[in-house]
Amino acid sequence: DAGVIQSPRHEVTEMGQEVTLRCKPISGHNSLFWYRQTMMRGLELLIYFNNNVPIDDSGMPEDRFSAKMPNASFSTLKIQPSEPRDSAVYFCASSRQGWTEAFFGQGTRLTVV
Amino acid sequence: AQKVTQAQTEISVVEKEDVTLDCVYETRDTTYYLFWYKQPPSGELVFLIRRNSFDEQNEISGRYSWNFQKSTSSFNFTITASQVVDSAVYFCALSEAFEGGGSNYKLTFGKGTLLTVNP
């Protein structure tokens, strides 16, 4: 079975540009998480979807960040406009239910210059 | 307050030594779940184990073992006879219900412990 698929794996963009990160969860999983990993703050939960509905977006840093899940097999995390401090590895994860083990994608390493 | 505390930032051992990674958690829920994940240098996050709050039975799986103690809110992880390939960052995580209940749970990670196993 395919795991969680994220694209792109690496993204380098200039400050001010729009960035869109994509995630395809594992088929049959109904919980989806977006995390950001930095050296300073570790793994932070940005937003959590259950059955395609955003349940908690309190971790989204500011209005420049937005996430959508139009269907059970696709989610996006958008940053507009991007800033150098957004540079991090962004992970998407999915699970069958919110309390079961989450399986992570390979991550997207974002660099904003 | 930090929900999941991994007090050891870095640990360095020599191959074949046993090593224990500590994890202390904080929750008001009676039902919650605890996890360990491994992040090798390649960067992916690999699920290792899940325990629910009602299952304090400790487990051994090959060279790995886990010690869950609700009385001290600890969920420690031990690697026996460590190997160089065990070098990674290990994360402890807590899953507890969102406010409002239901079946929505929030997975919170500790800061991680970098384990280096030297030959």
Image (cartoon, coloured by chain):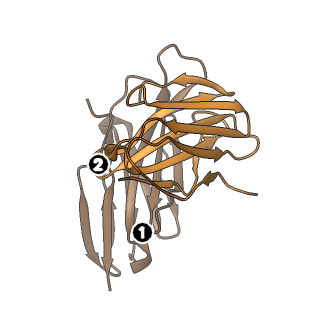
Chain colours: A orange, B brown
Residue in the picture at 43% in, 30% down = A64
Disc assigned to residue B106:
none
Q: Amino acid at mark 2?
A: Gln
Check disc 1 and report the residue beneath it.
B41
Q: Earlier in the sequence, mark 1 or mark 2?
A: 2
The foreground one among A86 and B67 is A86
Q: Chain of mark 2?
A: B
The spot of residue A65 in percent (x, y) is 46, 32
Query: Residue at the bottom extreme?
Result: B119
Q: Chain of mark 1?
A: B
The foreground one among B56 and A68 is A68
Labels 1 and 2 in the same subunit: yes
Instruction: Tell me how far mark 1 sits from mark 2, CA to CA.
Output: 19 Å
Residue in the picture at 57% in, 25% down = B104
Disc assigned to residue B6:
2
Residue A83 shows in the view: yes
Counting other residues with Cα less than 10 Å from the Cα at mark 1, is it few (<14), some (14-19), or many (20 or more)? Answer: few
Residue A101 shows in the view: no
Front label number (1 vs 2): 1
Q: In the structure shown, which secondary structural element does the residue marked by tag 1 occupy?
A: loop
Image quadrant where residue B13 sits: bottom left
Counting other residues with Cα less than 10 Å from the Cα at mark 2, is it few (<14), some (14-19), or many (20 or more)? Answer: many
The spot of residue B27 in percent (x, y) is 37, 28
Image quadrant where residue B110 sits: top left
Image-based side of A2 in relation to B38, left or right: right
Image-based side of A12 in relation to A52, left or right: left
Q: Amino acid at mark 1?
A: Pro
